[in-house]
Image (spheres, rainbow, N blue to C red):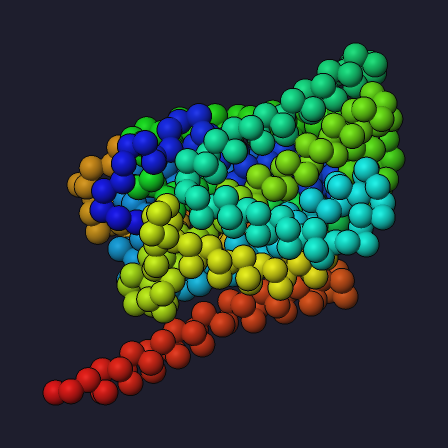
């Protein structure tokens, strides 16, 4: 981005919180399979424990590193400063690929929720997906402020129908006491792994929201407040959405296949089902817009470091946005919408976790290299405590991955794709070195 950005073009707290909410969550849409994977009691236990060991460490890491370097590029810049240009390239490459996978999920979800109004819509899946992708790209080219304003409206459209659903269910069904005990027959390990992958996917992206920090007014304070607001909203809506589904007595497999609009129709009538389906469409479009906003800044800063072609660093002459990067992202995602929802989640979380590992290592290295550097937010841990903070989310990912490996027949294709995507970073780095070496040789003495 340009060195000086007009305050009128910077994002303020409430739109930022809405952008964070949509980037990480967008409501409980996509959470429906957890009950069918894990069962009644285990689903609630996982829903409470997973944020504690997966999200809280990530949020603390993001707040400290963003406090040190609230600049365009976010996590890429953290890794570059701590671990060097090669690992920064890996970080950018992996998170670029992970976000392409993540983005491909939302147009598919948009079509599924649109199908609630008329099943024949599913026959037009590809053109509708492409319309979602390119509409979001056009909004992003206009800049971060329009995306922020749209995020506020879309967040309201997501949350309000769920408040109605939860209120109706709690009014109609006896509440009683909450029980978090594990069932006598817990789910199989492969199903537990898929439940974890689903919950983790519904909670990823806290680091993504830092890539446009220079476009946020008072970024250190705004991110701290915005992330706290978003986390509370996400946890509350997830917990009560799943609890309400349990209270309703709906068949969990039916909920997984037809989603929350079916639950709304059964509990409140067709009007509530339609409202939740429209809310699901708003959620899918909103998440796509905000995730595209975050990923489009990574090619921009990598191109500035001569790690990607310089044209990716082009800014729109009117809106001063990395429009070429946005267009490239839209083109790539347009070709990835053929994967199934479950496969995309496995690829998404696996690639994200590898980038996350580099970010945690950067936190530890920067603590050692620059112990006296001013940190507006500092995690109150040292040495072993920081390593434990790193191990917690990695342990959750390890359990989910192990469960998926035990169901190898179903999960082998996405896992092989993930392995290839991870290895492609080394191949791309080698080709980059060859290209740069050739350019250096070709220069006149």
Q: Position of residue 274 (x, y in %)?
A: 78, 30
Q: Quadrant of residue 417?
A: bottom right
Q: Height in image: 92 above or below 193? A: below
In percent of the image, x 48 and y 25: which residue is there?
229
Q: Position of residue 304 (x, y in %)?
A: 29, 61
In percent of the image, x 45 and y 70: which residue is there?
425
In percent of the image, x 32 and y 28: which residue is there?
221
Residue 83 seen in the current view: no
Residue 145 seen in the current view: yes
Q: Height in image: 102 above or below 17? A: below
Q: Nearer the viewer, residue 101 or 316?
A: 316
In percent of the image, x 81 and y 54: which residue is there?
123
Quadrant of the drawing holding the C terminus? bottom left
Looking at the image, residue 436 sits to the left or right of residue 349; the answer is left
Q: Residue furthest front?
A: 318
Q: Position of residue 65 (x, y in %)?
A: 32, 43
Tag count in the figure?
Answer: 0
Q: Position of residue 293 (x, y in %)?
A: 46, 46
């Amino acid at each position: 981005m340009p060195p000086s950005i007009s305050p009128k073009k910077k994002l303020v707290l409430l739109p930022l919180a809405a952008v964070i909410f949509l980037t990480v969550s967008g409501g409980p849409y996509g959470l429906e399979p957890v009950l069918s994977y894990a069962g009644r009691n285990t689903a609630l236990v996982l829903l409470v424990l997973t944020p504690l060991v997966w999200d809280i460490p990530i949020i603390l890491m993001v707040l400290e590193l963003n406090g040190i370097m609230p600049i365009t590029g976010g996590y890429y810049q953290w890794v570059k400063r701590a671990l060097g240009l090669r690992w920064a390239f890996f970080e950018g490459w992996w998170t670029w690929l992970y976000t392409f996978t993540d983005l491909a999920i939302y147009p598919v979800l948009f079509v599924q929720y649109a199908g609630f109004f008329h099943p024949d819509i599913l026959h037009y899946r590809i053109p509708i997906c492409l319309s979602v992708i390119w509409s979001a790209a056009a909004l992003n080219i206009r800049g971060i402020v329009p995306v922020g304003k749209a995020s506020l409206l879309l967040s309201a459209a997501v949350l309000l129908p769920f408040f109605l659903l939860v209120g109706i269910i709690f009014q109609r069904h006896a509440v009683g006491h909450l029980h978090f005990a594990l069932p006598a027959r817990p789910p199989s390990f492969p199903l537990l792994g898929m439940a974890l992958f689903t919950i983790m996917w519904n909670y990823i992206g806290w680091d993504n929201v830092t890539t446009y920090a220079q476009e946020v007014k008072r970024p250190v304070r705004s991110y701290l407040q915005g992330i706290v607001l978003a986390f509370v909203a996400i946890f509350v809506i997830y917990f009560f959405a799943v609890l309400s589904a349990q209270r309703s007595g709906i068949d969990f497999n039916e909920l997984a296949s037809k989603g929350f609009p079916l639950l709304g129709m059964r509990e409140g009538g067709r009007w509530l089902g339609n409202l939740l389906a429209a809310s699901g469409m708003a959620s899918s479009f909103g998440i796509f817009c905000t995730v595209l906003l975050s990923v489009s800044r990574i090619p921009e800063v990598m191109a500035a470091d001569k790690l990607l072609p310089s044209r990716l660093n082009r800014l729109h002459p009117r809106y001063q946005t990395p429009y070429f990067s946005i267009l490239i992202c839209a083109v790539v995602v347009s070709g990835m919408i053929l994967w199934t929802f479950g496969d995309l989640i496995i690829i998404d979380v696996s690639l994200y976790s590898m980038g996350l590992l580099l970010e945690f290592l950067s936190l530890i290295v920067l603590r050692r290299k620059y112990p006296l550097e001013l940190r507006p937010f500092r995690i109150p841990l040292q040495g072993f405590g920081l390593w434990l903070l790193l191990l917690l989310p990695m342990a959750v990912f390890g359990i989910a991955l192990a469960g998926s490996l035990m169901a190898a027949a179903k999960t082998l294709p996405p896992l092989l794709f993930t392995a290839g995507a991870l290895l492609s970073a080394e191949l791309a780095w080698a080709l980059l070195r060859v290209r740069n070496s050739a350019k250096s040789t070709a220069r006149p003495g």
